[in-house]
Amino acid sequence: MRSGTIVVAGLLTFVVLMGSGCVSLEEYNRVVAENESYLSRIQGLEAQQEGCVLGTDGVRSQLADCQIQNRACAERVAVLEAARASLLADMERLAEQVGQAALPVELNNALTDWAIRRSDLVTYDPESGVVRFNSDLLFDPGSDTVQDAAANQLRTLANILNSSAAENFDVLIVGHTDDIRIGQPETLQRHPTNWHLSAHRAIAVEDILKESGVPEARMAVVGRGEFQPIEPNRPGRTGNPRNRRVEIYIVPAGSVRMSGR
């Protein structure tokens, strides 16, 4: 309707001007050409407007889908946060119990002697009953496959845990990383975050202990990612080797709700 109005206006202008005898044919042609140009531009803008309306409808549909997905994710996060809070409460209670109860002399001596022999790979704190492995010697960067030499030492630890001196104790395996983000695409496929990597490494240690005879019912695994460093990480997310570790807590049986993996 608007386009047609412009053309009619142009024709009326021509008639009036021609009637007055003051407009040439050349001037008329120029006016008509301008009207046609305006008409073409208006038609183009009308087409763009129609396209924008369709695009807006599509965006609204996508937004509605995203809102539904976001609500589902929020519900999943709430469930995971509740589970994490429960686990942290268990660990805090565990830390208090570990600090209060020293390991039996025979078990303590066995762990101390073993850790001294392999001080390059592992440390043992007799006051807390915690065995700490250096992840850089347990695993290759970005991997959750235990190196052969480290696997042999885990089997030695399993022998100690299977002894009569340790029969009244359970095992909590906790994986930790530094704050360096995972960047290699092939690593990201298996370990999307440091949390995944730390949990997968704890499971890998549990697998070897299980293969060496430690019952699954005596073990639990936890991934803490980068969120419990023992020393500050270097600026710029360049990490700290001491924060890359796997800790094994030897605790009184029943002090933690054990459920394997």
Image (cartoon, helix red, strand yellow):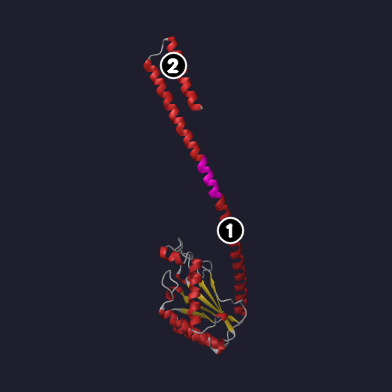
Q: Which residues are magenta?
A: 53-63
195 w.r.t. 61: above or below: below
| 235 magenta-colored | no
Left or right side of 103 for 201? left
- Cα–Cα span, label 2 and label 1: 66 Å
Give the residue number, with chain letter if any, for mark 1: 72
Q: Mark 1 or mark 2, which is nearer the start of the sequence?
A: 2
Q: Which mark is residue 14?
A: 2
One can see residue 80 in this view: yes
Asked whether residue 60 is drawn in magenta, I would say yes
Q: Measured along the vertical axis of the image, is residue 149 above or below residue 188?
A: below
Quarter occupied by residue 86? bottom right
Residue nearest the observer in this picture, 97 or 146:
146
- Which of these two is toward me, 238 or 201? 201
- Residue drawn at 43 percent across, 66 percent down: 187
Answer few, some or many: residues within 10 Å of disc 2's Cα (few below 14, many 20 plus, some between 14 and 19): many
Residue 232 seen anywhere in this rendered image of the structure: no
On the image, the x and y values in percent for residue 179 come to 48, 65
Q: Main secondary structure of the magenta part?
A: helix
* x and y, in percent, of residue 254 in the image: 62, 80
Q: Residue at 44% across / 30% down in the picture? A: 41
The crowding category of the residue bearing disc 1, from other C-alpha atoms within 10 Å (few below 14, some 14 to 19, many at least 20), is: few
Amino acid type of the residue tagged 2 in the rendering: Phe
> Is label 2 in a helix, a strand or a loop?
helix
Q: What x and y, as percent, mark residue 144? A: 45, 72
Quadrant of the rendered image containing residue 20: top left
Given the image, on which type of amino acid does mark 1 rest? Ala
